[in-house]
Amino acid sequence: MKRLPRLIPGLIPGLIPGLIPGLIPALALVAVSAWAGDLPNLSDPAVVSNADAAAATIPGVKKEDVRQTPVAGVFEVRRGADIVYMSGDGQYVFTGDLYNVPTHNNLTEAHRRVLRQKLIEAIPESQMVIFSPPQPKYTITVFTDVDCAYCRELHRQIADYNRLGVRVRYIFYPRTGPNTESWHKAEQVWCSADRKSALTRAKLGQALDAKPCGNTPVQREYELGKAIGLEGTPGIVASNGAMVGGYLPPQALVEELAQQQQQPTGPPVAQQ
């Protein structure tokens, strides 16, 4: 059975995102009948054309997850910050980014930025470890793994990022998942009296002696990383929701953040 790459987790039962990358070219239509054994019956155009019907038919999708696009007959379905498209009759699903040709704007990525923003804003700053200059020019949210080499390189230069006006908000994302050494280290950082110092020491490879302190934000932040489609660490997200990517040296990061401030914001406008 063929599988779609990067599909919204849970949107189509049995399909796993990220498998067989490049199997389907961007914007290529894929017949749903190829997965007839895994899909609900979507033959009625109203199923996808009507958000209520789509939410009731597709597992895990809510009404607000289905919306029209600027292209007649094409509907966006999202989970977290991941987006795929469906034809109005429910017979086709396709992946890829939707561009406005006259303006050269990537409408899909513009909406992803909004979705990432909302998801990250749901995490209170009290559950982050923050390194900030007195008067920051930029704020980034960094998904970090204590044992990640590039995460350690970024943190080694934290004073340089701060000096250039970058406020760094750390969120825990132990890549190896629950009940692993990196996961336990993240929880130890959180349970330390001085979390900033503990994070620095952990990234230097020093052992921490913090005792368990009950519930920590590690699980929630790990799930957040998966929801926004994080593919590695450090995962750097700009204040406008743009995924900057992995490690960048201080000056290069500042230049990237300055460019991000010039990007259009807001979700694509749908035809009503």
Image: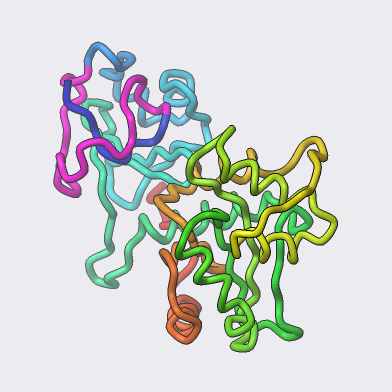
> Residue at horizontal 50%, vertical 71%?
153
Say which of 133 and 272 sits in front. 133
Residue farthest top in this picture = 37
Q: Is residue 67 left or right of residue 147?
A: left
Q: Is residue 6 above or below residue 172?
A: above
20 in magenta: yes
Q: At which x and y percent is residue 207? A: 68, 54
102 in magenta: no
Q: At which x and y percent is residue 96? A: 26, 49
Q: At which x and y percent is residue 169? A: 65, 65
Say which of 63 and 126 sits in front. 126
Q: Which contiguous range is marked in magenta? A: 10-35
Say which of 146 and 51 sits in front. 146
Q: Is residue 38 above or below residue 127?
A: above
Tell me how many marks there are.
Answer: 0
Which quadrant is the N terminus positioned in?
top left
Q: Is residue 172 above or below residue 9?
A: below
- Colour approach in the figure: rainbow
Q: At which x and y percent is residue 228? A: 48, 48
> Residue at horizontal 32%, vertical 63%?
106
Say which of 91 and 119 sits in front. 119
Q: Is residue 151 left or right of residue 170?
A: left
Prevalent SS, magenta region = loop
Residue farthest right in this picture = 193
Q: Is residue 58 left or right of residue 209?
A: left
> Residue at horizontal 31%, vertical 26%?
15
